[in-house]
Amino acid sequence: MLGLGTPLAGAATGAFASSTPPPGTPGLPYDQIGNGTPSFVGATAVIGSPNPAVSVGFDMEVPRGLPGDQDVYYLLMNVYDSADYYDQVGLAARDGSWHPLWANLRGCGAGTISTRDYAIAPADLQPGGTYHFEMLIQAGKIRFEVTLNGTVAWNFSRVTTAAWFDAQSPDSCGNTTAVQRSFTVFEEIWRLGSAGPPPWPFDFVNITANGSRVVGWDTWTAGVLPEIAGEPDAASVAKPDGAVQIWNEWFRLKTRALRIDAVPGSARAPSFATIEFAPLGMRPSDCAADLCNVSVLAADLGDGWEVRGEATAGSLTHEFDLVINVSSCTPLRTRAIDLVASDRRGLSTKAGLTIAVSDTRAPTVQPLANRTVTWGERAAFQANATDDSGDFNETGSYSWSFDYHGQATVSEGRMVFVTFSEAGNATGTLTVRDCFGNTAAPQVFRVEVVQPPSTVGPSIELLGTAITAALVIGGVAAYFWKSRGRGDRR
């Protein structure tokens, strides 16, 4: 590639040398950037073949964070046109804010670049806004435009002799035999004041030519930093919908799978998530500081969900056991979540994951022994059961049935009280369910109801007859009795 995507012949301090600070001594680990040699990472494709395109564009969310005041940094769409100009539109960091950028570089951008052929526009692009960037050739002009929600945020036009953007073309700028892909989207880093890459991943989405989605992207990198943190691999650059993702993170979170099938309660997926630290110059000993203390979690899940990663710092690669705590009665049992890895400086990265929670196992119930109770007594019956869901003590269902003299009595609860009114035999049945409806095998037991023990008191025996004479007092005869217990023969 040439122009703002390659070292520039005749440009001693690099692209936009007159409108941005020239590369100086950058912050480590980007100590190889400078002297007019940036680093690139992106993707390339063929557009519009066999028909040439007259419009190309893409959508991008502007980073929610702001760049450093001295950062020299671009995100660009690049394409050659039929007049052998190298045309570019995109996002630029300047003076601590984000701005549109345009370039229309003659001679395929291979010669000395005139300051009349490019500019970083003064218009500010708002952090977090999703903008559409477009280049259009029409009626002898090339138009560069940025819109937000259909409203033009900035535009610029200039005269051109080009009639279309090349799908692919033999390069007439010094190489008449090579057929080169014309269309690229990439990140271009000239200088960063920070010690690592900016903490923003970028997605070029809805990449179109003549309004049709461009697909078939291939990874493309150049420059002197092939090990730039988060450099995309073949699987991560091109998405199925034709979007291109530029990974640009101090560390990257990878998962072993996109879905976990779990049961309620606490589950552990060993070494499920991996953190990779990619910056140049990193050593394992550097992780003794806060630099590599990274935590993984899915925040603000609620509804009985908790997902977190557990690992110990001290290596350039961390493997995390993913711990999943999910109650059995959560309103949503299959859930798409983002695992977020964050360090103590506030930098983060994330990976998507689906967790499906299902419970097909019934509770385990401790068998109930047969019982003997007395009629009239308030007898207690208690169940003991366990389940694989963490909230079973609160959500489990216990149903008791007692068949007694042809009549059924039903009670609910882990402990119930029953009073039997007469002697006989009763059959008890306990049924336990969890909140998924899994039902344990009914526990059947017998209850023998007996009479209370005898309560006969002491006997009374008459010792003599009435004594009527000496013991007549006031006309009332007195009788003497002696109380004697049963078996007393005195």
Image: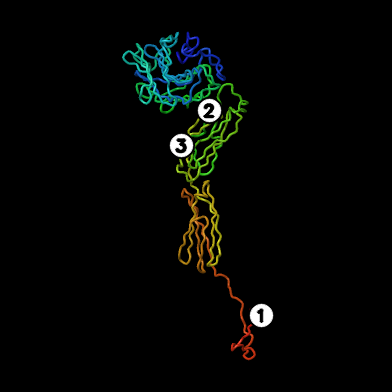
Give the numbered dot on residue 488. Answer: 1
Residue sitting at x 58%, y 27%: 291
Q: Amino acid at mark 3?
A: Ala
For disc 1, the neighbor class at 10 Å (few under 14, some 14 to 19, many from 20) is few
Residue identifier under label 2: 347
Give me the C-alpha separation between circle 3 and circle 2. Answer: 22 Å
Which image quarter is the C terminus in?
bottom right
User: Which marked residue is nearer to the observer: mark 3 or mark 1?
Assistant: 1
Q: Amino acid at mark 1?
A: Asp
Give me the C-alpha separation between circle 3 and circle 1. Answer: 87 Å
Give me the C-alpha separation between circle 1 and circle 2. Answer: 98 Å
Q: Amino acid at mark 2?
A: Leu
Mark nearer the N terminus (3 vs 2): 3
Q: Is residue 156 left or right of residue 27?
A: left
Q: Is residue 207 left or right of residue 222?
A: left
Residue identifier under label 3: 336
Q: Position of residue 216 (x, y in %)?
A: 42, 24
Which image quarter is the N terminus in?
top left
Instruction: Tell me the SS state at disc 1.
Output: loop
Mark nearer the N terminus (1 vs 2): 2
